[in-house]
Image: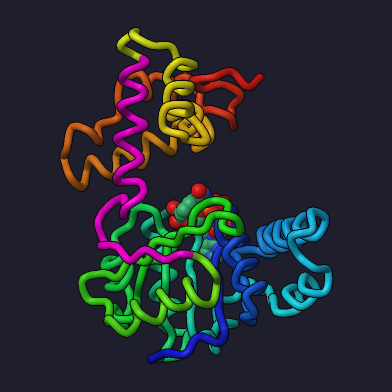
Amino acid sequence: MTRIERVGVVGAGTMGSGIAEVCAKAGFPTTVIESAPEFLETGRIRIESSMAKAVDRGRLDAADRDAAWARLGFDTDVSALSDADLVVEAISEDRTAKFGLFARLDEVTPAHAILASNTSSIPIIELGMATGRPRQVIGVHFFNPAVVQKLVEVIPSTVTENAVTATVRDFVGERLGKTAVVTADRAGFVVNRLLIPYLLQSIELLDSGVNTAAEIDTAMKLGCAHPMGPLELCDLIGLDIVAGVADVLFEEFHERHYAAPPLLRRLVAAGHLGRKSGVGFHDYS
Ligand SMILES: NC(=O)c1ccc[n+]([C@@H]2O[C@H](COP(=O)([O-])OP(=O)(O)OC[C@H]3O[C@@H](n4cnc5c(N)ncnc54)[C@H](O)[C@@H]3O)[C@@H](O)[C@H]2O)c1
C-alpha cells in the first residue's frame, strides 16, 4: 500500500489553493504547480492570506501557520512532482487539459504515486485511461471552501484498486481531518446528484407563480432548518454553474428532474448569474 508522505497539488485556483493549504496544515510537504508564474503568484497570495485570516481569527497558531507555510513549495513545472506519493489535480474543468495533464503526471511521478482529481464532472475512468496506471487514479471531490468544508467525496473508478481507495480514504479522513464518503464514478457523485434536482424544483416552483423567491427560501430555512434557501444557494453557487452541472447530470442519466428549467436558462442568458453578477433570484446590488 502506498504511504503518503509528499503531496502535489496541480492548479492553485479556488480549489487547489484550499486543498494545498489543508495538506500543508496537516503536516504534508506539498508542492503546488501552476501553469504560469503569474497564476502561481496569485495562488501563493491566496494561500498566504487565507492562513493569515485563520491566525487573525484565532483558528490557527502563528507558529503552526509558519510551519505549514514552510512545508509549501511552488513551481510551474510538473516535473517538480518527481517525489510525490499523491497528486491532487485541481486545474480548470477542461477535458483536453486534464487528459494531457494526467498523461504528463504519469511520466513525471514515481510508479507508486496515486493520481487524484478534484473534477466535478469528468468520469474518473477517462482520466485514468489517459495514464498507464488507471488502477492508481481516483477522484477526491473537495467542497468550496476546501479549508472549511468537512466533506470529501472519494471516487474510485471501475478499475481503481481497493488498496488505493483505502489509502485515499484514510488520508482524507485520518490525516486531513475531513469526512470521506466513498461513492461510485457516476455524474454528480452523491451531493450534486441529490442537490441539483432540489434546486431545479425550487426554480420551477418560482416560475409557476405560486410562490415568491423569498417565500420559497424562507419555507426551506424555517421548515427544514437549512442555513440557506434553495434560490439563495443557486445565487451563491452561480446560476451558470447550476445549469452546467444539471446538463452533465441530464446527459448522463436522461432523467427529467435533471433538466435545467427555462427560467434558469433565461437568467443565465441575461447574465443574471447570482451574487457574482449582482443579481440572480435575489438582488445584491
Ligand atoms: N469551485 C468549486 O466550487 C469547485 C468545487 C468542487 C470541485 N471543483 C473542481 O475543481 C477544479 C478546479 O476548479 P476551481 O474552481 O478551483 O477553478 P479555478 O479556475 O479557480 O482554478 C483553476 C486553476 O488551474 C490552473 N490551471 C489550468 N490549467 C493548468 C495546468 N495545465 N497546469 C497547472 N495549472 C493549471 C489555472 O491557472 C487556475 O488557477 C475543477 O475541476 C472543478 O470542477 C470546483
Closest to the observer: 95 or 136? 136
Q: Position of residue 41 (x, y in %)?
A: 73, 61
Above/below status of 199 relative to 136: above
Query: Hey, which quadrant is residue 257 in on the image?
Result: top left
Q: Is residue 148 visible?
A: yes
Q: Is residue 92 visible?
A: no
Colour scheme of the rendered structure: rainbow
Above/below status of 203 relative to 169: above
Residue 182 is left or right of residue 280, and the answer is: left
- Which residue occupies 40% across, 81% down? 167
Q: Position of residue 267 (x, y in %)?
A: 43, 21
- Which residue occupies 33% across, 33% down? 198
Q: Residue furthest top?
A: 209
- Which residue occupies 37% across, 66% down? 154
Above/below status of 183 relative to 173: above
Which residue range is magenta in the image? 179-206
Q: Position of residue 69 (x, y in %)?
A: 75, 73
Q: Position of residue 137 (x, y in %)?
A: 35, 75
- Asked if residue 28 is among those painted magenta in the image, a careful observer would answer no
